[in-house]
Image (cartoon, coloured by chain):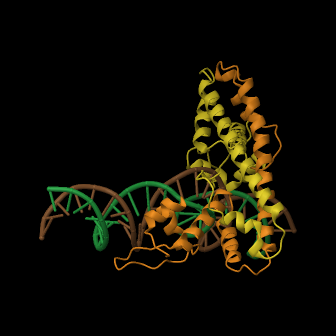
Chain colours: A yellow, B orange, C green, D brown
Amino acid sequence: MMQSVPIGEAARQSGVKVPTIRYYEQIGLLAAPPRTEGNRRLYDAADLRRLAFIRHARELGFEVEAIRTLLTLQDNPNQSCATADAIAKAHLAEVDHRIASLMALRAELERMVTECACGRVAECRVIETLSDHTHHHGKLA
Amino acid sequence: MMQSVPIGEAARQSGVKVPTIRYYEQIGLLAAPPRTEGNRRLYDAADLRRLAFIRHARELGFEVEAIRTLLTLQDNPNQSCATADAIAKAHLAEVDHRIASLMALRAELERMVTECACGRVAECRVIETLSDHTHHHGKLA
DNA sequence: CTTGCTCCTCTAGCCACTAGAGGATGTACC
DNA sequence: GGTACATCCTCTAGTGGCTAGAGGAGCAAG
């Protein structure tokens, strides 16, 4: 049947906002769809699947460049999926790293908050902890 | 003694990069320091402490606006630290939320990666999982 | 025919920096 | 004194992934 829908409906069905869809077209992540006589974009079922794919990948934290590669792979189903696997594995490692950083950070924040007797700033553990410059020189989370 | 150091040394001692220090001055997070005859910035010990405070807070993921408030609090030690406490608590909640999102994400990634038999793309679980649009409409991590 | 919705393009803004151009100053060595 | 080189200065523009808004055109219902 391949019925086509305008951008608003595509946004509703895919969960990707209208300006974001146009942005994806602009950066070449989504092909420019055909237009009506009145110059309006018309998306078919394949476009909607592609949009859903992009949305899901963004939800999982994949960067646009990674998604670009994954989409190319999806378009060539007979290739080896080693590349997709590598991208996913690299991303998993990255996520693990971020979780570890956040957990460490959380522990310090927790300590800060629980130790704060909440009197004057002069005795505040929150301010004191932040002022303490005897910490290591690590990376931002 | 209050010896003053140029921006490069301040960067070395605080762990904040030179352009970032200038950026902090530009956005008013750090007061503009005095200059030498040759127009070079000179930072004293108090400036370095302030820089270390900012750096540590940024490491802990506090936003610049939150840091601005925390710095104002630090400058008024007789005030109640309830505000500082509230900022830290709000941030802790935010961090908890981010950790939870990342853990959920991690689980899905892990599943993707381990289920991938690594043959052709046509059977790839990574691609398949991303294509699967039968998922809930949640938020980006 | 007018109201009100959706759509169009285009530009500018968000955050927290980072990169680079193009030039001035300071220091170490000969 | 000269010269090589590091460090500093200001300024503009770019990053990623959108988001907001201006200013206008198209389209369906009453």
Q: Quadrant of residue A49?
A: top right
Residue at 73 percent across and 46 percent down: it is: A5
Image quadrant occupied by the N terminus of chain A? top right
Say which of B49 and C20 sits in front.
B49
Residue at 81 percent across and 58 percent down: it is: B93
Residue at 37 percent across and 77 percent down: it is: B39
Say which of C28 and A67 sits in front.
C28
Q: Is residue A76 above or below residue A105?
A: above
Q: Position of residue A61 (x, y in %)?
A: 68, 44
Q: Position of residue D12 (x, y in %)?
A: 42, 68
Q: Position of residue A82 (x, y in %)?
A: 61, 24
Compared across the picture, whether B83 is left or right of B44 comes to: right
Compared across the picture, whether C4 is left or right of D13 comes to: right
Residue at 71 percent across and 28 percent down: it is: B113
Total numbered labels placed on residues in the image:
0
Say which of C25 and A76 sits in front.
C25
Let me know if residue A16 appears in the view: no
Let me know if residue A80 appears in the view: yes
Which residue appears farthest toward the front when viewing the image? B1
Q: Position of residue D9 (x, y in %)?
A: 39, 72
Q: Is residue A20 above or below residue A64?
A: below
Compared across the picture, whether A94 is left or right of D11 comes to: right
Compared across the picture, whether A61 is left or right of B29 comes to: right
